[in-house]
Image (cartoon, grey):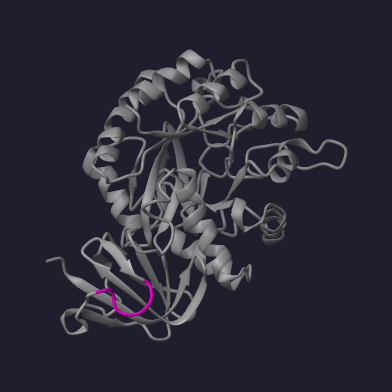
Amino acid sequence: MAARTVLAGAQVVLPTGTVPDGRVTVEGSRITDTGGSAPGADPGTADTVDLSGHWLVPGFVDLHNHGGGGASFTNGTVEDVLHGVRTHRLHGTTTLVASTVTGEMDALAQRAGLLSELAEQGEIAGVHFEGPFISPCRKGAHSEALLRDPDPAAVRKLLDAARGQARMVTLATELPGGLDSVRLLTEHGVIAAVGHTDADYEQTAAAIDAGATVATHLFNAMPPLGHRAPGPITALLEDERVTVELIDDGTHLHPAALRLAFHHAGAARVAFITDAMDAAGFGDGVYHLGPLEVEVRDGVARLAEGGSIAGSTLTLDRAFHRAATVDRLPVPDIVRAISTNPARLLGLDDRVGSIEPGKDADLVVLDAEFALKGVLRKGEWIVDPRGD
């Protein structure tokens, strides 16, 4: 018989609203009840955890993450990747897509093979290719020498290498082959994301019509919004078919820009991401993002040559805390952006992304000030709120 745990007394954020003094029952790896005692359960046999004065929210889902804990998803061994994944789990990210950066096509295909094995084992939720199909004008922390146009045959090579585990590809869709590649990705059930782009408003609208549904880290690595040249930002914000990624670390976005995007798109169309690199959960120092050297000082990652922002050192518990305390967003809206919406985009919302009976027992405990105190993944405590 599976072990039963009752989490009692917290403010529980359910799809139907926040329940004060809520009660969630977990049996084995699944949530079995979000009200009173689970049907047929004997409360005397349950391990009851008193979470009075805390919040209970779904485990976080990160669409866009390059590494953490000193380990990169773009190179290194399987154990290196697993170490990075474990680092983010300690910070509440119970579902994670591993992102690559621009590299040689054969190297990216080889990397996709390694990451796809971990996806098949359930350690990660799939692979996101960020590059090499991006604009040299908006390359950010990508090697310009390795960039290439999004030829559908090249895109297909990476999809084949990922063996059905590719979840998203970021493209500069204005480049030759861009729209055909968007259609190819859509036909294969892979998210086409507009990012690292120099497209104008009309070109971006055409990409959305072709099937693009995500804006890769909105505002960053794309032309700014202008009153005569609205550019990609306006096209991505105004179209209800698009979910916009936002990096809420206080570096990538001014708080006013984040509020503008959040309130214009609405809580249903925002996905908080980390865009994390190796230093997330680790510390300052010198790292590499693909072939490029990165210096991290005071938690901000920049290319050693040129000074461009090079990913982030963010973890999603910090993003949640900032969204609640600095941006003053309603907690249910933060939950949608950090869990529910990315789970839906990944097609995993039947298993994760919300607190409902039958779903995986992926849960995060936050204190009254929104500091992380507990992480439950598939019914197992990664961080025990009792301090055990």
Q: Is residue 352 above or below residue 318?
A: above
Q: Position of residue 81 (x, y in %)?
A: 29, 43
Q: Is residue 171 above or below residue 376?
A: above
Residue 287 in magenta? no
Seen at 55% across and 58% down, the residue is 249
Whether residue 78 sits left or right of residue 348 in the image: it is left
Whether residue 3 sits left or right of residue 144 in the image: it is left
* Between 367 and 287, the one nearer to me in the picture: 367
Q: Is residue 275 visible?
A: no
Seen at 40% across and 18% down, the residue is 157
Q: Residue furthest front?
A: 40
Whether residue 307 sits left or right of residue 387 in the image: it is right
Whether residue 226 sits left or right of residue 36 in the image: it is right
- Report the quarter where the N terminus lies: bottom left
Seen at 30% across and 67% down, the residue is 32
| Magenta stretch, overall SS | loop
Q: Position of residue 370 (x, y in %)?
A: 48, 74
Residue 36 in magenta? yes
Q: Is residue 193 above or below residue 41?
A: above
Quadrant of residue 193 within the rendered picture: top right
Q: Is residue 140 visible?
A: yes
Quadrant of residue 119 within the rendered picture: top left
Magenta residues, start to end: 34-39
Q: Residue furthest right?
A: 228
- Report the quarter where the C terminus lies: bottom left
* Between 337 and 79, the one nearer to me in the picture: 337
Q: Position of residue 303 (x, y in %)?
A: 52, 41
Quadrant of residue 72 within the rendered picture: top left
Q: Position of residue 239 (x, y in %)?
A: 70, 42
Seen at 34% across and 28% down, the residue is 162
User: Total of numbered circles in the picture?
Assistant: 0
